[in-house]
Amino acid sequence: MMKNKIENPFDYETLSNLPLTVELCGEIVAAIQTAIYQEKTINSFAPLREPKRFVKANGQYIVTEIRYGQTFMNSYLDITYPSADMAVRYPVVFYTHGGGFFGGSKTLGDPLAVGDAHNFMFEDIVGTGFTFVNVDYVLTPAGYYPDPLRQLAEAIDYCAEHAEALNLDMSRIAVMGSSAGAILTAQYGALLVNPIYRERLQIQPKIDPASVRCLVIDDAPLRTECFNWKMRSMMGNYLKTTDMSSDTALSYNAYAFFNADMKPCFFDAGPLDGFPEDMLACGEKLDALGVENEVFIPEEKLPHGFLNLARENDEAARCEKRILAFLKKYINAAADPEALK
């Protein structure tokens, strides 16, 4: 991890009085990483945990630490199947975790989110009849934008190329992410349908775009022009620029590249400290483009990452049920759009 001189990286009121530079952004993030992880390794070309294959207590079968790429650190994914019976192939949900691109993992989820760090919603998705692919990606300072997006595309392409061996139905896919992972999901969705965006980022997914049926975007900060000091410091580190009007920052903003070919999207956000304005703006844009979408903003002042509260909060539980229904509606549908009517 980077060395840093920041004594209290969570004191944004004091830090915001300093001139915001890329160096300061890096020091803040490095200090947060140190506070969370101490000396623990968070980036590696080797698996961060021992690979395992086992049947969980609920009957779901999990295979961990499958290497999907060679270029970037943390290029591993886990697959959870509804059961160990490989005679049936289920539709696939790809998931990327949150953590500001400097924290989190496919195993622990987002360390900055509230609630259960083990993300019980994963099991609920599998229990509904999906295979769940949990994708890890490189964290700063070992990688920066758009490395994690390249990895998400690489992971999905790898699974398509090895669908037979991995027992995956790659003709029916949903892509889902939370926070930083939601940013990746929105960016990947735009990549699939917008050639200008693909050319701009020089990322070319190899899969058939028709195989991706929908996206679930859980509280993504997208519109860089709306970022406050805290967000500019976090994304300034990841983007390697504090100029939120720069070409780099503008290309990060997938919202600007949504078009009429976007897949159906589900958006949600925690109104307490999440990004409801961004998610509402995304829904409004897709409405204007004629793209199917749903937006869920809790009536309660729930925080960013509120889905982790679904075992104890009715609004969070209602959102999870809406997500599961959305996945079932679109991922099981025929490729013909008329089948959705």
Image (tube, helix red, strand yellow):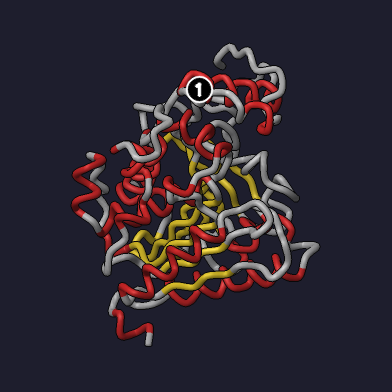
Question: Pointer 1: what residue?
Answer: 44
- What residue sits 67% from the left and 41% below the top? 112
Q: Tell me, yes or no, if residue 306 can be seen here.
A: yes
Which quadrant would the N terminus be assigned to in this image?
top right
* Residue nearest the observer in this picture, 108 or 240: 240
Residue 124 vertical placement versus 57 (above, below): below
* Residue nearest the observer in this picture, 278 or 70: 278
Could you say whether the residue bearing mark 1 is in a helix, strand or loop? Answer: loop
* Residue nearest the observer in this picture, 230 or 118: 230
| Mark 1 burial class by Cα count in 10 Å: few <14, some 14-19, many 20+ | some
Q: Tell me, yes or no, if residue 120 can be seen here.
A: no
Residue 268 in the image, given as x and y percentages of width and height = 56, 63
Residue 7 in the image, given as x and y percentages of width and height = 70, 17
Name of the residue lying farthest toward the bottom:
341
Q: Is residue 307 left or right of residue 42?
A: right
Name of the residue lying farthest toward the right:
312
Residue type at tag 1: Ser
Residue 25 in the image, given as x and y percentages of width and height = 52, 25
Q: Quadrant of residue 319?
A: bottom right
- What residue sits 30% from the left and 55% below the top? 257
Q: Quadrant of residue 15?
A: top right
- What residue sits 48% from the left and 56% below the top? 176
Residue 297 vertical placement versus 237 (above, below): below
Residue 115 vertical placement versus 173 (above, below): above
Residue 101 vertical placement versus 80 (above, below): above
- What residue sits 65% from the left and 17% below the top? 6
Name of the residue lying farthest toward the front:
17
Which quadrant would the C terminus be assigned to in this image?
bottom left
Q: Is residue 247 left or right of residue 74?
A: left
Residue 292 in the image, given as x and y percentages of width and height = 39, 75
